[in-house]
Image (cartoon, helix red, strand yellow):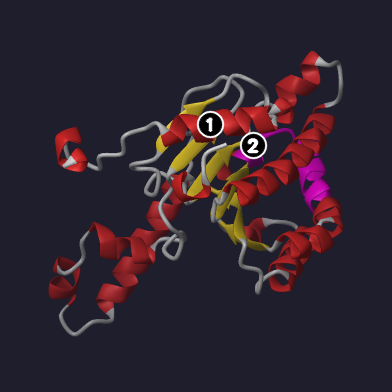
Amino acid sequence: MVPAHAAPGHVAIIMDGNGRWARQHHLPRLEGHRRGAVAARNVVQWAADAGVKVISLFAFSTENWSRPKAEVNGLMQLLSTLLPTQLAKMRRQGVKLRTLGDISALPKSARSVIEEACEATRDNARIELVLCLNYGGQQEVAAGAKALARWACGQDDPEQALASIDAASFRDFLWCGDLPPVDLLIRTGSEQRISNFYLWDAAYAELFFCPCFWPEFSKADFVTALDWYGERERRFGKTGEQLRS
């Protein structure tokens, strides 16, 4: 595994392929999501052991509301029932839970469980687990633009205030404003797109696409992604010669 000093600070994962895994095994789609939850628990432990400080899991997108109602309800029920069972383990592992996205649209039972878990783990400091729920990258940028407009309207000189905003300061208006940018973005399930995930903060992320379905994602797959990341030359607009000198 990549040494802790070389590990990405922020890993984001698009956990794709639960439904296809279930279909392949002649199981209900919800069973695929249940097995995916097991993989999610495992990857948080692997990330913490590798020295990753923040791990974001794309659990439910703004577009997922368009899925069959039974599947959406099942996902919310899974969230409500499984998360409380993990609190003791999260405390032992030093996992701090937070959410990213508009959770106000989630059922009250799910919101209550999430809020309680975030409060119960808020003092943990080994690794931060960001559950992206009712999240969309475009929606985040739009919300940031609205927040910026409200801020500017409250200044003595709105035009001058807007002129002072650059990419770095605009980020403060985004939901992810207090998180480090994404270093490594992993997607399972063989698709090669980011599907409206972290559009702003994945600007310089290394993109690793894994062909396996999410319930099959193993420690070996995670290690492969970290090793691949460790070999990348991250230039951020500079030349390789500049970095090496």
Q: Is residue 20 left or right of residue 234?
A: right
Look at label 1 and name its amino acid. Answer: Ala
User: Is 88 drawn above or below residue 203 in the view shown?
Assistant: below
Kind of element beneath mark 1: helix
Q: Position of residue 245 (x, y in %)?
A: 16, 42
User: Is 19 drawn above or below residue 146 in the view shown?
Assistant: above
Q: Quadrant of residue 120?
A: bottom right
User: Is 52 drawn above or below residue 162 in the view shown?
Assistant: above
Asked whether 24 or 238 is in front, the reply is 238
The region drawn magenta spans: 64-79
Question: Which mark, by number, is residue 66?
Answer: 2
Tell me, yes or no, whether the two marked residues, 2 and 1, touch with CB atoms within 8 Å. no
Look at label 2 and name its amino acid. Answer: Ser
Q: In terms of sequence position, does the residue under pointer 2 or pointer 1 come before the other?
A: 2
Q: Is residue 123 left or right of residue 34?
A: left
Q: CA distance from mark 2 to mark 1?
A: 31 Å
Q: Position of residue 90 (x, y in %)?
A: 75, 60
Magenta segment's dominant SS is helix
Kind of element beneath mark 2: helix
Residue for point 82% across, 33% down: 30
Q: Is residue 32 left or right of residue 228?
A: right
Report the number of numbered marks: 2
User: Is 139 drawn above or below residue 176 in the view shown?
Assistant: above
Label 2 or label 1, whichever lies nearer to me, is 1
Residue for point 44% across, 34% down: 229
Residue 108 appearing in the image: no
Mark 1, Cα crowd under 10 Å, few <14 / some 14-19 / many 20+, is many
Asked whether 119 or 244 is in front, the reply is 244
Q: Position of residue 222 (x, y in %)?
A: 61, 33
Residue for point 84% across, 51% down: 82
**Residue hosting label 1:** 225
